[in-house]
Image (cartoon, rainbow, N blue to C red):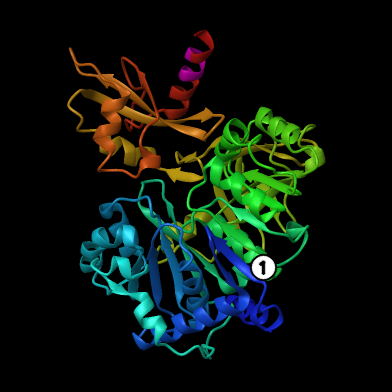
Amino acid sequence: MPLLIGDVFRSAALSTPKRTAVTLGNRSLSYGDLDQQANRCANALRGLGVRHGDRVVLWSDTSLEAVPLFAGLAKLGTTFAPANARLGPAEAAEMIALARPKLLVVDPEHAEAAEQVAKDVGVPLLRTGDESASALPGRPLADLTGSASADDVEAPNLVERDPHVIFFTSGSTGRSKGVVLSHRVNFLRTHPGALLEPRGTTVCMYPLFHMGAWTLALQAWQARSHVVLLEAATAEQVGGAVETHRAERLNCIPAVWQRILDEGSDRFDLSSLRVIDSGTSATPPELLAAITDRLPDAILRVFYGSTEAGSITLLEHDDVPRKPGSCGPPHSGVELRLSDAGEVCARSPVLFDGYFDNAEATAEALVDGWYHTGDLGVLDDEGFLSIVGRARDIIRTGGESVSPSEVEAALADHPALLDVAVVGVPDAKWGEMVCAIAVPRAGATVDLEALQKHCESRLARFKVPRRLEILSEIPRTAATNQVQRRLIIERLATRTRQR
C-alpha cells in the first residue's frame, strides 16, 4: 500500500466522520466535513486546470480554509507550497516565483499586495475569506468550491515518492530554497507512535507557513485526534486554547515558552498537559527547569532537527536535568555522525527529497545519503549531542532562519554607517537574536530605532535587528574581506561579562 497523505483524510472520514479534526478560534471542522471540503477544493482546482505534478502556493496567515486546500491538493497529487506570511511583497514574489506555481492563493490580508505579485509571477490569483472581502483582488475560492462536486478525487499516477509539500527556507546567501518532502517522507514523519502518546488534543502555536504546524497537525490527523490552530502565539491564545480544549500536548519554541511563563502560566489551567515539547533553537537549561516547575506532571522533551531532516535528536524527560545544554541522542531511525570539521550529519528514512530546482544546493547538503546540517556539534561519552556553533552563518531566531548577509545588504546604504555586520547572539527568549554591529561615519550617530525603521520596508519583521552594538572596526579576513562573525560574537560576550 503506498503511503499517501490524501489517504489520511479519506480513512479518518470513514472511521470517525463526526470527530473534530481541527479548530481555529470558534470554528471547527469534523473529519467528515474536512474530507468533503477537501474534495470540493480538489474538484474546483482541477476545473481550473490544476493537475498532478503542479504546484500551488498559499501566501496567507493561519486560516481554517488552508486545511481543506492542503488536503485537497494532496489528493490531486499537486504540491502544496506555503509562503511565509510575514514577508513583504518583493521578498514574497521571489519566494513564490521559485516554486513556478500553477496558481497563487492568498487570504484577504495579503490580497492587495498579491495582485501585483501574481502578475509578476504570471499566475492566476485566488482568495480565501467571506463575502465581506468581495472588493479585494483575486477570485474567491469559496465561489468555486461552493458549486464543486464533493465526490472523492484520485490521481491514478500518484506514487508515494512524488512531492507532497515544498517548505521554503533561507539559504546562506539569503535567497530562498524550497525543501521538497514527498508523500512517503511526510507520512513516515507523522505516523502514529510514541510521539503521540497520549493521543489527545494538540495546541499548535506555529503559523501554517511553517513546517512545524503541518507536522503537528498531520501527527494529530494520523491518530484521528484534534489539533487547535492559533492566530498568534501569544500567552493569551496558547494558554486559553489549552484550558478551553483540555489539551494534552503543547509544542512551543523557547521564546513562546518564556512568554507563557511570564504572562500566562498562572492565568490559565494548564493541568491537562501531559506532553510538552521544545526545540528549533537553543533552549536554556534555566528555561527548561522553569517549565518543569510550572508543569511538574507533564513529560518534557527537547527536539533538535530541521525542515530538511525532521527530528534528528530527542532529549527525553529524565535526561533534561542531567544533560544541561544537550539536545539528546539520535532520534529513532536516525544515524548521526560528526564530520572531520565537527559538522553534524544525519541519515534517516525521512530526509528531504532535495531542494526544488536547485541541484547544486541539494548536492552540497546531501552527500552520500548524509544530510549536512551546517551546525557544529560535540558528542559526549553516552552519544548525546550538543550544538556548539555553526558551519554556516544562518541565524536561528524564534524558529525562523535569517541570513546575516541579507540584513547587511538592507543596512548597507544607511547614511550614518561606514560599515556594518550582522551576527546572531545567544538569547534566552529567541534562541538567537539578530544583532547589528555598526561602524558609524565620522560625526554621525547610530541608534537601533533608526536602523529598524530603515529595514521596515525591506525585510520581514523577524529579520530586523533587535540589538545594536558599536565597534570602531568590523573584523574581516585579510584575503577575502569576509566578516569574522565568530570573533565578533566572542568580543560581544566578553563585553557583556564586563558590564
Q: Is residue 318 left or right of residue 189?
A: right
Q: Is residue 110 left or right of residue 385?
A: left
Question: Residue 155 appears at what percent x and percent y?
Answer: 51, 88
At x 24%, y 67%, the residue is 137
The reply to whether residue 141 is visible in this rendering is yes
- Disc 1 crowd, CA 10 A, few/some/many (<14, 14-19, 20+): some
Q: Is residue 492 magenta?
A: yes
At x 65%, y 49%, the residue is 242
The residue beneath circle 1 is 188
Q: Nearer the viewer, residue 343 or 29?
A: 29
Q: Quadrant of residue 92?
A: bottom left
Q: Amino acid at mark 1?
A: Leu
Give the residues drawn in magenta, as a range.
491-495
Quarter of the image where the N terminus is located: bottom right
Q: Main secondary structure of the magenta part?
A: helix
Q: Nearer the viewer, residue 483 or 318?
A: 318
Q: Is residue 254 magenta?
A: no
